[in-house]
Image: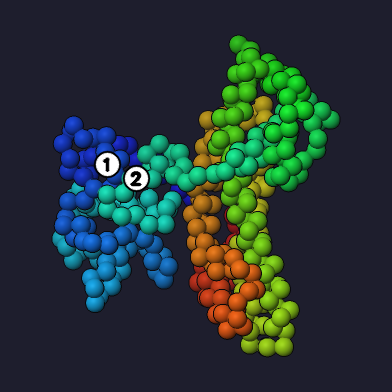
Amino acid sequence: MDNDPPLPAPDIAAASGQPPAARANRHFVFVHRLFAAPGAVFKLDPNIGEPVLALDLGTVKANLPFHAVMRAFDITHDSPDARQLDAVARGLRHVRQIRPGDSIPAELLDGSASWKVEARHFAAAKGRLIAGLPGASGRVPPAKTPMEFAMLADDPALVPVLRELYAALGESLGPPAKSADEAAVTIDGLSEELAYIEALRERIGGLRGLIATLRAARDIYRRDRVVLDRILRTIQLLERPIAAYERRFEAFDKNFADTVDAARNIAQRIGLARELRDSMHAETMRWDETVAAWAIGLGGTPRSQRGRIDDTYRFAARHFPIASDWGAG
């Protein structure tokens, strides 16, 4: 989990060696000319799980771990560039790659998110909060799925009911008692934070879709023992982390089952939401290439299918070995 505090703007400016007048700098700025090399990019190396500086020098392509960069180019641990490399390492928990000069991810600056969500995610989050309002049971339709929760938030027929529920929430948040409009603003603010949780919940649902595709492939290759064994092993390896992700969402949702309690403790609840948002976003980013490879389902030639099966097995074995305790999440 990412428990590091937001990175203040003055530290960024100091690390870049800029004068005080430029202390509002919100970009990764380096001093050593190495970082000005064309095509220089920071990313996580999937093989070693460490941040590296990737350089394309024409005939030579190199992925240099940060400790190797510092040693080879005499970058001391207390130098501005070393502090920037530390910030880059933290930033790569939130974005796939960073180039020198890029904006610092918002997570490091003020705790907000550097990635976007859709209107449906906001609506689903708001619907969950509506369902947890006092008096909502019996007055709004029951909902279990994100789509059903989103319908609660967007149903114009519920406007009069929601007005009354917000008024009751305002009374519950006093003294001094808040108006229905103030309560609605509180709900919207929480919904903006929880929209990211809904987007991640949707991503985890997509991982379940990947498992379903692999099970369909299992039926296709039931007579090919080598490929079948690889598919079965892959499913076994991937099931455990996905189930652990789902348990984390279930545990998290308990913090928002009572909307009044969540609104009364809004700062603490937002902290929980951002902690889950950042840790789960980092987890799901590692799946992106594998999920994208299966976007066509079982389409393509048998050879390309087997290639995707092999790649997915290697991904599963590297990131989720059976010895890992994925039930601890």
- Coloring applied to the structure: rainbow
**Closer mark to the observer between disc 2 and disc 1:** 2
Dot 1 lies on which element? Answer: helix
N-terminal-most mark, 2 or 1: 1
Judged left or right of residue 129, residue 17 is left
The residue sitting at 57% across, 64% down in the picture is 291
User: Visible in this render: residue 230?
Assistant: yes
- Residue 104 got which mark? 2
- Residue 261 got which mark? none
Tell me which amino acid carries mark 1: Ile
The residue sitting at 66% across, 53% down in the picture is 247
**Circles 2 and 1: CB atoms closer than 8 Å:** yes
Label 2 crowding class (10 Å Cα cut-off): few <14, some 14-19, many 20+?
A: many
Dot 2 lies on which element? Answer: loop
Image quarter (top left, top right, bottom left or bottom right) of the C terminus: bottom right
The residue sitting at 62% across, 28% down in the picture is 187
**Residue 14 x %, y %:** 21, 40
Most extreme residue toward the right is 138
Label 1 crowding class (10 Å Cα cut-off): few <14, some 14-19, many 20+?
A: many
Judged left or right of residue 12, residue 246 is right
User: Visible in this render: residue 64?
Assistant: no
Quadrant position of residue 92: bottom left
For mark 1, what is the residue? 12
Tell me which amino acid carries mark 2: Ile
